[in-house]
Amino acid sequence: MNGTNWIVVWAAAMLGLGATASAQPTSAQSGAYTIQETRLGPMDAPVVSPVFSGDGRHFAYVTKRGETQCVVVDGQAGLEYDKIGSLIFSPDGNRVAYAARRGNKWLAVVDGRADAEYDAVGSPIFSQDGKRVAYVAVKGTTWFVVVDGQAGAEYDGIGKGTLIFSPDGKGMAYVAVKGTKWFVVVDGQASPEYGQILNGSLIFSPDGKRVAYGAVKGAKELVVVDGQASTEYDGIAQASLIFSPDGKRVAYGAGKGDKWLMVVDDQAGPEYDAIACLIFSADGKRVAYDAQKGPKWFVVVDGQAGAEYDDASNSNVIFSPDGKRVAYAARNGQKWFAVVDGRAGAEYDVIGTGTLIFSPDGKRVAYGASKGAKWFVVVDGQAGAEYDGIAQGTLIFSPDGKRVAYAARNGQKWLVVVDGQAGAEYDGIGSLIFSPDGKHVAYAAWKGSKRMVVVDGQAGAAYQGVFKGTLNFSPDGVLEFLAMKENSLYRVKYIPVP
C-alpha cells in the first residue's frame, strides 16, 4: 500500500534545538473536538531506531552527539554512550530499557539507570506488567541471566531469543546449554537435559501457570509439558506448539514417517500428508487446522474433517470470538471462496490473505476479494464497491460490530471507506481505528508534504509527520497521537466537546 510505510518524514535540515521539553499545551477548536497540542521537546538529528510505547503515548529514539550516542525519551535526552542497542518500552509504556556500550564493556540501562558492566549484554525484556526486567549477559566464557539487577546461574550458553517472562510476570524461562546438553530453566530450576531444544518452541500458557517446549532426544523429537515428556515422534512441526487461551489444553503438529498428525491433549489425531494453521477457539473448547490427503485439502474442526477442496493450505481458519462459528478460505479450480459454518460462498479470483474476519460479536463476516483487476470487500455475503486495491490489514469492524471500515485505492490515490461510503482521496493512508463506542473513525493520511489525522471524514491540522502506531482512542473517546511540527515532537489530543 502506497503510504503505509511513510509514517514519519524527517525534515531534511532538522537540527537539534537543545531546548527543554514544554508541557504547556495549546488548544484549538475543530468540529466536535478541542485539539490540544503539547510540545514534548526537539527532534534531534539524526534520528536512529525510533520506537513507540504500546499505547502510542511515548516515543524514544537514539541520536548521535559527535562520537557518542544517547537516547531521547519524549524529548528528554539521557546519558551518552559509545554505542546504544535496541530500545524497548515496557508494555504499560512507563519504562524504557536498552543495552549500551562504554569503552569495551556493555551494560543495560533501565529507566535511565545503568546496571553493572559485562563483556556482552543482550536486549533487555520487560514482564507484561512492566514491573520486572531481564537480559542475558556474558562475562568471559560464562553466560547468565540478570533479573531485576541480580545475576543468575552460569552456563556455557543461552539460546538466542529464548528468554521470556510468563504473561502474569511471575515466571521466567530460557534455554541454556552446558557442554553438549541443552535444557530449559524455569524460575531458576533446570529441566532434564536433551540433545537440543527446538528453536522457538519454548512457551508459557496464557495464564502463566504452565510451560511447554519441543526437544530432541536421539533421533526423535518430543514435546515437554509441565516437565513431563510426551510421546516421541520423527519430528515436531515448527512453531506449531500452542496452549489454548485458557491454558488448559496443548496442541502441536507431529511427524510420523512421511505422515503428519495433530496431537491435542496428548491424543494423536488421524494421519495426513500435510497439516497447517492450528488454532484454538478463544474459550479453548474447540480446535481446528488444515489438512491434506492426496491432492485434496480440508479443514478439521474438533476432529471432524470438512468438505474437500483443491486448496485450503493457507486458509487462515478462524473462529468467531465466542467460538461458535468457523470460517476459512478455500479454492476449487481457479476460483476462491469463503466457507462460513460449512457453507461455501460466492466464487472470486482471489480472497485476500488474512482479510477474513468476524465482527466482535461473531454475527458478521467480512473479507477482501477480487474479480479481474478489481478489488472489493464482501460483508455478510454482499460485495461492495470496486476499487483498484484494498489495503491489507486495514479491514476492521467497530467494537460493537455494527460498522465496517477499510482503506482502498483508486489509481494512485488512497481513501477510506466507512459503511460503504468513500472518503476523500489522499496520497497515502496510515493507521485506521474506530472509537470504543464505534461512533467515530480516525486514520492517518498524507497529501503532498502534509501529514494529518482525519476524524469522521474531517482532516485535521497538517504536520511534518504523524507517527505510525501512536493513533489511539482512550476509553472516554479522547483521540491521541504523536506528531512532528517545526522539528519538535508533540503529543496531540482530540478531546470531544460535551
Image (cartoon, rainbow, N blue to C red):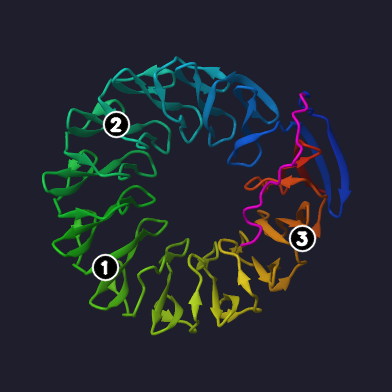
Main SS of residues in magenta: loop
Whether 86 is drawn above or below 235: the answer is above
- Could you tell me which residue is drawn at 32 percent across and 74 percent down? 298
Q: Which amino acid does the dot numbered 3 rest on?
A: Asp
The image quadrant that residue 398 belongs to is bottom right
Residue 222 in sight from this viewpoint: yes
Given contact means CB atoms under 8 Å apart, are the residues at marks 3 and 2 in contact? no
Q: Residues within 10 Å of mark 1 (few under 14, many from 20)?
A: some
| Residue beneath disc 1 | 303
In the picture, measured across the screen, residue 238 lies left or right of residue 68, that is: left
Q: Which residues are magenta?
A: 1-18
- Residue 84, labelled with which disc? none
- Could you tell me which residue is drawn at 43 percent across and 65 percent down? 318
Q: Residues within 10 Å of mark 2 (few under 14, many from 20)?
A: some
Q: Which amino acid does the dot numbered 2 rest on?
A: Val
Q: Tell me the element at label 3.
A: loop
Whether 490 is drawn above or below 400: the answer is above
